[in-house]
Each structure stands twice: as C-alpha cells, then as structure tokens.
Image: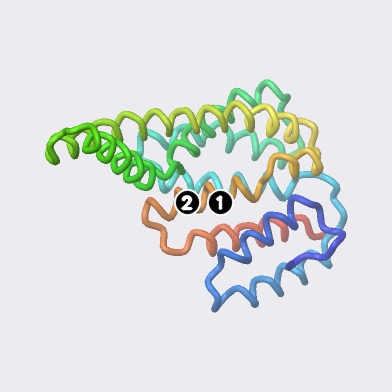
Amino acid sequence: MPTTDIAPAWLRHVATDLELQLPTDVRDEWTARLRDLFEELPDTGGLFAVHVWQAETVLPLLAEAAQEREAAVFEAPGDLHRAAARGRTPDQDTWRTALTPMLLHLYDAAYDRAGAYSEAHAGARDYALANGFPAAEADGYGHEYAQLSSDANARACAEAHAQALGPALARAYASDGCEAYAETFPAAQLRAVVRVMTERGDPVPATRLAEGLISALATSRP
C-alpha cells in the first residue's frame, strides 16, 4: 500500500486501486512519490484534495472521453468542486442536483454492454433452438433479445448507482467529511471512470488519473 496507515481511508483505497492499475514500468516510481508527498502533507482533515482532483483531472478526462453533447453533464459538478476547493462548500441539495446527471452518464457509459449483449444473445438463441426454432430465426431472436435487455439493464444499472451514490456523495461533499466520502467506495467509482476512458480509447487512463491525484495532493502542501 503506497500510503501510511495514518492516511485518510479514501486516499488509501484510491491509491491502492490506482497502484494496481498503473503500468508496471511507472508503478513503483509513482508509489514512492505518493508516499513521500503524503509524509510532507499537513493533516487538512477535509476533502480539499478530492475537490481539486475531481475538478482538475477526473471530470475533465470524463468530458474529454464523452461525445460533445454529453460533456455538459460534467460542468455543474466541476463548478461545485472548484467552489468547494475555494472554501465555498455548496449545500447537500445543490450537490445532489448536479451529481445525479453526471452519475447517470458515468454508469451508463461504464456498463459492459458488449459482455452483457454476448451473454444475453447466447442464452436467448439457445432457448430458441431448444424450442424448435430454425438456426437463423434463433440467432435473430437472440440478437433482438440481447439488444432490448442490454439497453434496459444499462439504464437500470445507471439509475441504481445514481440513486445510491448521489445522496451519499452529496452528504460527504456538503459536510467535508473524509469518513463519509470513504463510505461511498471511491475506489469503485474510480474503476468506473477507468473503464469509461478505456472504452473511449484512452490507452493509459490510470496514469493520467494517478498524476492528477499527485498534483491535487501537492496543492495541500504548506
């Protein structure tokens, strides 16, 4: 684990996950830099570095990966994170209103449509074959079912995550609470971000996120 035991839980979880996803040729060097940096940091006791990381790295990278018409969902959360980093923390309702569209987009984009489609197609095709359909008709039935089910499941997954995470993140951000933020499973959120960036063609998403985390933590130095 790249950080000491006195690091906030959210940082331990995120840094450990990032370390595992980094290319092997940069992993050790990044881990050492993070450890050295954290040992020099003051105990801010808040989410300043989180707000800077989200505003300056995570959300811009997601917007970059999004189609032009989709990128707007990252603007309001980015504005709130920048305000919070300047000490003007928005209230819980304001956070939730801004976060919900972003979370819906994130988890819809992160859904494994290809895997879900393949599994649904195979299952529906085999069911049709077992019930006497000719092979071509069974295959067509499988594709139709896979299309309908994978889209519906992606929407359901995104809505479930937005409904669960939106209020939890809003409470954590509004209260500037490290423990509350750790309880939102930020490492799992990070994996969704990495998946979206990878699917949109970024060859080294973890590296860019890891460097952004270093920069965000460095802004907390005296």
Q: In the image, 51: left or right of 206?
A: right
Q: Amino acid at mark 1?
A: Arg
Q: Are marks 2 and 1 in contact (CB under 8 Å)?
A: yes
Residue visible at 58% across and 38% down? Answer: 78
Label 2's element? Answer: helix
For disc 2, the marked residue is: 195
Q: Residue at x 77, y 55 (%)?
A: 220
Estimate the x, y position of residue 8 in percent, counting from the top left. Answer: 81, 53
Amino acid type, residue under disc 2 in the picture: Arg
Residue 182 vs residue 214, the one in the foreground: 182
Residue 222 versus residue 99: which sits nearer the camera? 99
- Local packing at callout 1 (Cα closer than 10 Å; few below 14, some 14-19, many 20+) is some
Where disc 1 sits, the SS reads: helix
Q: Which of the 4 quarters of the picture holds residue 148?
A: top left
Colouring scheme applied when the structure was drawn: rainbow
Q: Nearer the viewer, residue 146 or 216?
A: 146
Residue 208's place in the image compared with 154, above or below, is below
Circle 2 Cα neighbour tier, 10 Å, few/some/many (<14 / 14–19 / ≥20): many
> Residue 80 vs residue 197: left or right?
right
Percent of width and height locating residue 159: 52, 27
Q: Nearer the viewer, residue 92 or 195?
A: 195
Image quarter of the C terminus:
bottom right
Give the farthest residue toward the top: 93
Q: Which mark is residue 191?
A: 1
Q: Please tell me which residue is depicted at 34% across the width and 46% down the height of the picture.
A: 114
Quarter of the figure with residue 172: top right
Query: Which residue is at 83% across, 66% downward?
Result: 40
Q: In the figure, 99 relative to 123: above or below? A: above
